[in-house]
Amino acid sequence: MNEISNDEFLNKHGFLTLLSVIKEHWAKIVRRGQPNGVAELDENRLIPLDRIPKTALDNLVKVENNEQRLLLTKKDVQNGDSVLVLDDGSDEHLESLYLVVDDTQLDREDGYVFYHSSVTWSTVMHKPENFVFYGDKNSEVVDIPLGTDYVTESMLGQAITNILDEKLQDLYKLIGTTDISGFGDGTITGILDELNSNTPILIQSKDEPSN
């Protein structure tokens, strides 16, 4: 460090020397990453993770069981972090999540708040008996036998017939007091025959005379 004599303190040389000393000292403070300074950047001009205080980020820490959770220290987790317990000790060996709320009591349950657990399907309450997807009825879902990795022509035909039967019933309910002409014998086979023969289908009111 350059020394400044009493004679030089107030002249130009002394001022520039003092300014140089201040800049050099400030640069050392910045490189050390003081709380009120700027953390040193890495080669990618990013702040290294080890320069960021652990309390600034919420972390997820995994442990095998609740015994290991109660062995965690403040070095491992802080307030706001979550702890994933891979085995809650139940017969189902479910996973559970805890929020750290008091990192001074990590060896006690008071240091955590339980907020999530995976469950088995059998323990889910108030399950709906029927699942409705976008307004479609369950009867319209093609029933393929378990273990079947292909669909035969007869299976596909039956599925189409089931769907058409359902749609035909809806059509009758929709049109109410109207006549349907061109539907052959009124069965699915008759309807398909008429459609395949390009026969026009006429839907008219019973009160409206046909030409």
Image: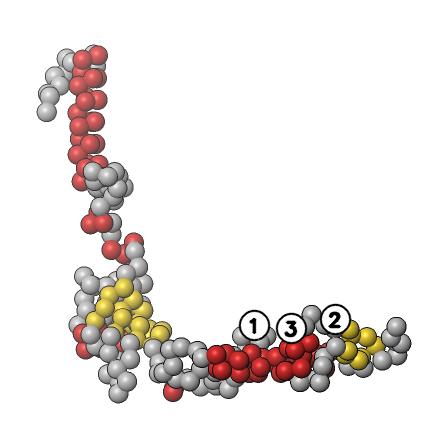
Q: Which mark is residue 205?
A: none
Mark 3: amino acid: Asn
Q: Is residue 30 above or below residue 79?
A: above
Query: What residue is disc 3 on?
Result: 196
Question: Crowding at label 2, few (<14), some or many (≥20) Cα neighbours within 10 Å?
Answer: few
Sooner in the amino-acid sequence: mark 2 or mark 1: 1
Q: How dense is the environment of label 3, judged by Cα within 10 Å: few (below 14), some, or many (20 and up)? A: few
In the image, what residue type sits under mark 1?
Answer: Tyr
Front-most of residues 57 and 37: 57
- Badges 2 and 1: C-beta atoms under 8 Å apart? no
Depicted 192 relative to depicted 17: above or below: below
Q: Position of residue 146 (x, y in %)?
A: 39, 84
The answer to whether residue 16 is seen in the rendering is: yes
Question: Where, quadrant-wise, is the N terminus in this rendering?
Answer: top left
From the top left corner, tell me how far across and down residue 41 is, in percent.
23, 39
143 relative to 67 in the view: left or right: right
User: How far apart are the alpha carbons under marks 1 and 3?
Assistant: 30 Å
Q: Which mark is residue 134?
A: 1
Q: Position of residue 89 (x, y in %)?
A: 24, 83
State whether residue 76 is above or below residue 172.
Answer: above
Q: Nearer the viewer, mark 2 or mark 1?
A: 2
Name the foreground residue: 125 vs 98: 125
Q: CA distance from mark 2 to mark 3?
A: 11 Å
Of all residues, the one furthest to the front in this rendering is 197
Identity of the amino acid at label 2?
A: Pro
155 displayed left or right of 39:
right
Mark found first going from the N terminus, 1 or 3: 1
